[in-house]
């Protein structure tokens, strides 16, 4: 009889990370190849992408202008790159080049334009005479987002291992993430890649006990996309459970310390988004006479972002519930159905954990899995930080509970992610343009954990084929429509 050789956890972990890295690189090469293919075979619906009017103010231009009266050395390459800048990418490149010129441009947060501008005038500035200024900006955006996605995929695997405590399940989920149905946006000049990197990476640092780094990363996610501020909910969840554990120890001082610390961390996550709103208020409202002020400037709480979304894009509660929008609801139905199924399945399987917000477990045992996100409460952890192995996150469970607590998708550690997903899904369904649900929810880990969980179940293996077919169809459809300036999501 031959014995099955057991692979050491660190070796297996390294092997899996290599697979995830290769999958992420392969998926980006696939998407870029599809973009080139469809752009070559088909004519775009809108051919205005290469148009680039002069900036309203030369002082806001972030790049040195190309030599006067000189065309790019490679005009065909320049034209190909510029014509691929479509949809929201037009705004991001324009902001990187000219700054915030119009009121509606403030709907696009500055992290991606700042990155594009920085790389275009440093690393890629020698390319300006070769392909031109705007093509360099577009090229910078493509490089930034595709590299950011690769790092996001690696962090996704690490986070999945820490939460699910099942490396095989984490690997399947990570590969699904690499080929997710919104993949076209992760390889285009959109904010999805940077948001995924900083939100997923921030959560990984949070559960690893590196709270200061986590807050910085989560704050940057809010500087990339407005929904990044919702990541403060993880800090709130952490704070609630740490305060509850402190109450069990009957330490009033520790309770106050936990609450104040959590509040300060949440404020730090909010700062970038609201600082940008203040910047918009200063540029648009300050200095004008009262009769020329924009309506939102006169509001008691002048929030530019909310006004733009409502005034220019018609975003609001139930405002999208129109019969003519039925095709968009159908387009978003697969991702919304998966989100709903993942939440309902968790709630049905673990009702005590779900409806008690994890406090039921902590009532039974103050050291149980309900202390999720609490590795730094005090120094009485059964596994001191000095015993942590490089590449591993600290164990959040005492050894005596490791055999009794569920692992995988039904673990209590998944609970805050389920709550976060539920809030996002409700927001995109009732408030936003529903067709953006595919990319809006695409960086939410529970979707891939649930899909991977179904694939690993003998009774649900057919769902695996359906999920992969769904992802493949949306990758092909998205790359075809989006790259040729046709509506997708």
Image (tube, grey):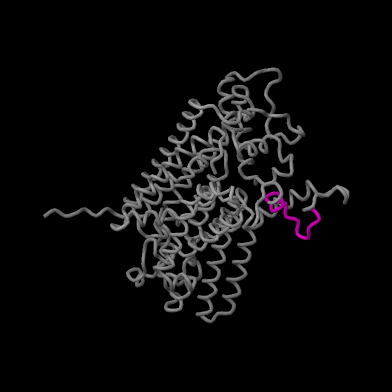
Q: Say whether residue 443 is magenta.
A: no
Q: Quadrant of the C terminus?
A: top right
Query: For the view shown, which residue lies furthest in the front direction?
Result: 323
Looking at the picture, tell me which residue is in the foreground, 334 or 170: 334
Q: Say whether residue 306 is magenta.
A: yes
Left or right: 58 in relation to 92: right
State the image coordinates of residue 488 (x, y, percent, origin top left): 54, 41
Which residue is rendered at x = 41% and y = 42% of the image? 472
State the image coordinates of residue 158 (x, y, percent, origin top left): 42, 53
Q: Quadrant of the N terminus?
A: bottom left
- As drawn, 45 above or below 379: above
Looking at the picture, tell me which residue is in the foreground, 477 or 404: 477
- As drawn, 29 above or below 406: above
Looking at the picture, tell me which residue is in the foreground, 40 or 75: 40
**Main secondary structure found in the magenta portion:** helix
Query: For the view shown, which residue lies furthest in the left direction?
Result: 1
Query: For the view shown, which residue lies furthest in the bottom direction?
Result: 250
Q: How many marks?
A: 0
- As drawn, 169 above or below 470: below
State the image coordinates of residue 478 (x, y, percent, origin top left): 49, 39
Choose top left, top right, bottom left or bottom right for residue 138: top right
Left or right: 275 in relation to 124: right
Which residue is rendered at x = 52% and y = 47% of the image? 439
Left or right: 98 in relation to 15: right
State the image coordinates of residue 238 (x, y, percent, origin top left): 53, 67
- Which residues, given as a range, are shown in magenta? 297-309
């Amino acid at each position: 009889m031959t014995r099955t050789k057991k692979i050491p956890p660190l070796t297996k972990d390294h092997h899996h990370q290599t697979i995830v890295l290769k999958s992420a690189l392969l998926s980006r090469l696939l998407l870029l190849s599809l973009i080139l293919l469809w752009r070559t075979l088909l004519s775009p619906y809108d051919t205005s992408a290469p148009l680039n009017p002069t900036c309203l103010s030369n002082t806001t231009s972030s790049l040195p202008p190309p030599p006067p009266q000189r065309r790019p050395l490679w005009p065909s390459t320049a034209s190909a790159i510029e014509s691929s800048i479509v949809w929201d990418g037009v705004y991001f490149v324009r902001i990187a080049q000219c700054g915030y010129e119009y009121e509606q441009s403030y709907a696009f947060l500055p992290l991606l334009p700042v990155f594009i501008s920085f790389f275009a005038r440093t690393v890629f500035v020698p390319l300006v005479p070769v392909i031109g200024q705007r093509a360099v900006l577009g090229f910078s955006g493509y490089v930034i987002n595709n590299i950011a996605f690769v790092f996001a995929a690696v962090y996704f695997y690490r986070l999945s291992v820490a939460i699910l405590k099942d490396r095989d399940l984490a690997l399947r989920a990570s590969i699904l993430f690499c080929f997710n149905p919104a993949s076209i946006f992760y390889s285009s000049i959109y904010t999805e890649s940077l948001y995924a990197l900083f939100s997923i990476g921030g959560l990984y640092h949070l559960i690893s006990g590196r709270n200061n780094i986590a807050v910085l990363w989560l704050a940057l996610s809010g500087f990339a996309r407005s929904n990044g501020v919702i990541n403060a909910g993880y800090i709130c969840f952490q704070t609630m459970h740490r305060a509850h554990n402190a109450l069990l120890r009957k330490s009033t001082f520790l309770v106050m310390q936990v609450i104040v610390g959590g509040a300060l961390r949440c404020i730090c996550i909010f700062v970038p988004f609201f600082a940008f709103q203040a910047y918009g208020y200063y540029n648009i409202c300050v200095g004008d006479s009262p009769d020329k002020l924009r309506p939102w400037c006169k509001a008691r709480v002048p929030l530019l972002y909310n006004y733009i979304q409502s005034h220019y894009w018609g975003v609001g509660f139930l405002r999208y519930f129109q019969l003519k929008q039925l095709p968009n609801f159908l387009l978003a139905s697969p991702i919304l159905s998966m989100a709903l199924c993942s939440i309902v399945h968790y709630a049905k399987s673990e009702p005590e954990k779900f409806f008690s917000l994890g406090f039921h477990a902590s009532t039974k045992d103050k050291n149980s899995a309900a202390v999720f996100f609490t590795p730094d409460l005090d120094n009485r952890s059964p596994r001191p930080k000095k015993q942590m192995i490089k590449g591993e996150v600290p164990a959040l469970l005492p050894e005596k509970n490791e055999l009794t607590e569920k692992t995988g998708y039904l673990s209590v550690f998944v609970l805050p992610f389920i709550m976060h997903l539920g809030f996002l899904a409700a927001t995109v369904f009732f408030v936003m343009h529903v067709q953006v649900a595919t990319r809006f929810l695409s960086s939410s880990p529970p979707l891939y954990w649930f899909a991977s969980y179904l694939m690993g179940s003998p009774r649900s293996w057919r769902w695996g084929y359906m999920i992969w077919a769904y992802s493949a169809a949306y990758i092909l459809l998205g790359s075809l429509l989006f790259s040729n300036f046709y509506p997708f999501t």
